[in-house]
Amino acid sequence: MTQPAASVANSAAPPRPALWKRLLDSRFTPPFFITLILLIGNLSFGILESYQKTLLAIVAAMVTEMALGRIFLGKWPHPASAYITGISVGILLRSPAYWPYALCAALSITSKYALRVKGRHICNPSNFGICALLFLASESVAGLSIQWGNNMVSLIVIWVLGATILWRAKRFLTTATYVISFFLLALLRAHITGDPWLSEVSPITGPEYQLFMFFMITDPKTTLRSWKGQVAVAIAVAVVEMLLRLDQSIYAPLYALFLVGPPALLLEMFFDGRRRRKASPLPTLRPELAQ
């Protein structure tokens, strides 16, 4: 006697993980960390325009993600990525109006589905959305530019937690390379401008840089696969940022990643394609067709 199809399917299905294991899903770690940055930064220095505007950005990002994921991929995406995008917009954007937060969040998520090459989106979503609004609506929006002040405890907590998470995610080398490059290039900027070295280094202590270093340049979906490529991109971003800073651009890191990241990803795809074509043997003709 054969078992009913339903019972066979049920017996073959893997057991569902326990609730505590689902809550410890590694995909929830970055949202927890970015929420910690928000709380520490806002309680200590008031980095948010308002909780309502940040919540609006989060909701807009998650609703857009759910809708586009269902339409284009046929499934409900995991909410962690959209949450990170929304909260990043809420932290990094400044505007007296509400609409830029919703528009920027929706535009950021839309870029994941509109700007795709070979099934991969090529721009970090929040970086793309924020750069687009800073460039196109500069009269209505601005970017965050607040330092942690003299409260080194907050900075140390964020950096230790961020380094631990990046080490587990195998992205620590990218951030470490960028930080080292930033400090070395700050010496060069100080020599060129005549400003004190500490004034050139101080921006890296701001919450904007915490999000940039721990989430934007390390985004697994929009960074190169090889560690050498990740190191090269981190150095290139730091160099372009230095040039933009010398040109008095206050949003230099965001623009630098926007200019360097997508071309680097496209180059990697191009060379990967060439290697695959060279590795695959050419089809041989049958004897009767070769004559």
Image (cartoon, helix red, strand yellow):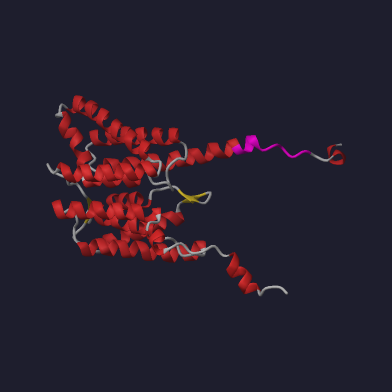
Q: In x, y percent, where is residue 40?
A: 19, 52
Q: In x, y percent, where is residue 218?
A: 37, 43
Outermost residue, top side: 191
- Residue at image x 25%, y 60%? 54
User: Does residue 263 appear left or right of residue 83 in this picture?
Assistant: right
Quick check: 266 above or below 26? above
- Residue at image x 29%, y 61%? 57
Closer-to-camera residue (115/51): 51
User: Does residue 119 appear left or right of residue 80 in this picture?
Assistant: right
Q: Quarter of the image containing the N terminus?
A: bottom right
Magenta-span inclusion, residue 281: yes
Q: In x, y percent, where is residue 290?
A: 84, 37
- Residue at image x 48%, y 65%? 70
Q: How many marks?
A: 0
Q: Quarter of the image containing the C terminus?
A: top right
Q: In x, y percent, where is residue 261?
A: 40, 41
The answer to whether residue 158 is visible is yes
**Quarter of the rendering containing residue 182:** top left
Quick check: 243 above or below 115? above
Outermost residue, front side: 1
**Quarter of the rendering containing residue 183:** top left
Magenta-span inclusion, residue 187: no
The answer to whether residue 217 is visible is no
User: Does residue 125 appear left or right of residue 94 in this picture?
Assistant: right
Quick check: 254 above or below 240? below
User: Does residue 60 appear left or right of residue 4 in this picture?
Assistant: left
Segment colored magenta? 276-284
Quick check: 11 above or below 172? below
- Residue at image x 39%, y 53%? 26
